[in-house]
Image: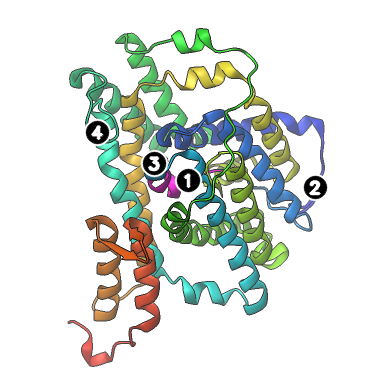
Amino acid sequence: MKPTDYNFRVKDSILGIQFLFVAFGALVLVPILTGLDPNVALFTAGVGTLVFQLVNRSAVPPIFLASSFAFIAPISYGVKTWGIAATMSGLVASGLLYVVLSFLIRFKGDNFIHKLLPSIVVGPVIISIGLILSPVAVFMAMGKTGDGSIQLIPFEQAIIISMVSLFAMVFISLLGKGIFKLIPILGGIIAGYVVAMIMGVVDFSLVSKAAWLVMPNFTAPEFNWQAIIFILPIAIAPAIEHIGDMLAISNVTKVDYLKKPGLKNTLLGDGLATSVASMFGGPPNTTYSEVTGAVTVTKAYNPAIMTWAAIAAILLAFVGKLGGLLSTIPVPVMGGIMLLLFGIIASIGISTLTRANVDFNCPRNLIIVSMILVFSIGGMTFDFFGVPFSGIGLGAITGIVLNLILPEARKEDHIL
């Protein structure tokens, strides 16, 4: 069977559940960190994957879509500032931005997006996302709330739990074999959770109170201009990430998905999946590299396997006990996981710059990267017509504008 063939066979359901298992740790981590409902995230990951497959039915890549890490910071800020419903309006708009980009690519060609969003802009934006999140990870690893204001678990216990979670994930990533190498997040959570249980800091009362079958806490979006303008620019980074993911799955399957169904369709599917997820109160969707890794190991190229994974995710969303169990995970467990994950996000940004061979002897490049990092991380705020721009969004807009208006540096202007 070719990688582009779609065969819906019941026997592939077991493989589908396995792929969901690979994605599970990262999938539920985003809603847990941002105050969203993990059961809703499961539901929207399944629905989003099916939407993506429907849009790309001419040649469906074997990928699974679920919670995007790029949006953790803006969702956390949005939920605290405007509430979940208003934040969802910003996330719906982010998905629609993908749709607009897909149509621009359809009419102007694939090179358009690289001209608008080159590595010199995308790299430092990704770095900013990881560094802005790092204090949250440190506070949680020490047993505090994400803002560091309240000590939830004594420091002596919290630091042991978080370090066990961190190093379990590190060693699974480095030493794991086969399918186990693909679930370092899940392995780290389990290791930290076991230590937390031994220390007596896990409260199982939420599990006993939860019903077996429940309706997830769906939340419809409420229109909010401030949330939209704050979150919209952040969609730039995962839009570029999408291209890398399509290249990765193309290399694995030896099928050029950038040619058929084409970036214009895969980006459209990703955008619609994100908007649909946000309509229900779930985090934005993105293609999961963990699942692509699992496809590489198993050689299971039939995209119908991802359909089974999506169906399993939707069914699990209605299991109340699962949501109750996830809510018992202590803060230091998640903090330990986040210490590495957020550092990796920043490192990916650095990698984006190095792979593109960005010349840092060039003053123009130094100016663009410096302004993005300082505006994003330093807390700069501009107020346009009563709407504040700050953080990653401001940094991304600054980078795009500078890249478009700054003249190319002359050879003699390069720093030696």
Q: Which is in the foreground here, disc 1 or disc 3?
A: 1
Q: Residue at x 38, y 32 (%)?
A: 169
Amino acid carrying mark 2 in the image:
Tyr
Q: Which residue is mark 4?
A: 139
Q: Which is in the foreground here, disc 2 or disc 3?
A: 3
Lower sequence index among marks 1 and 3:
3
Image side of residue 196 versus residue 370, left or right: right
Q: Which residue is mark 3?
A: 76
Q: Which residue is mark 1?
A: 87
Label 2 to label 1, Cα distance in Å?
36 Å
Lower sequence index among marks 3 and 4:
3
Amino acid carrying mark 1 in the image:
Thr
- Secondary structure of the residue carrying tag 3 is helix
Q: Which is more toward the observer, 58 or 148?
A: 148
Question: Magenta region: which residues?
Answer: 64-75
Q: Which is in the foreground here, disc 4 or disc 1?
A: 1
Lower sequence index among marks 2 and 1:
2
Amino acid carrying mark 4 in the image:
Phe
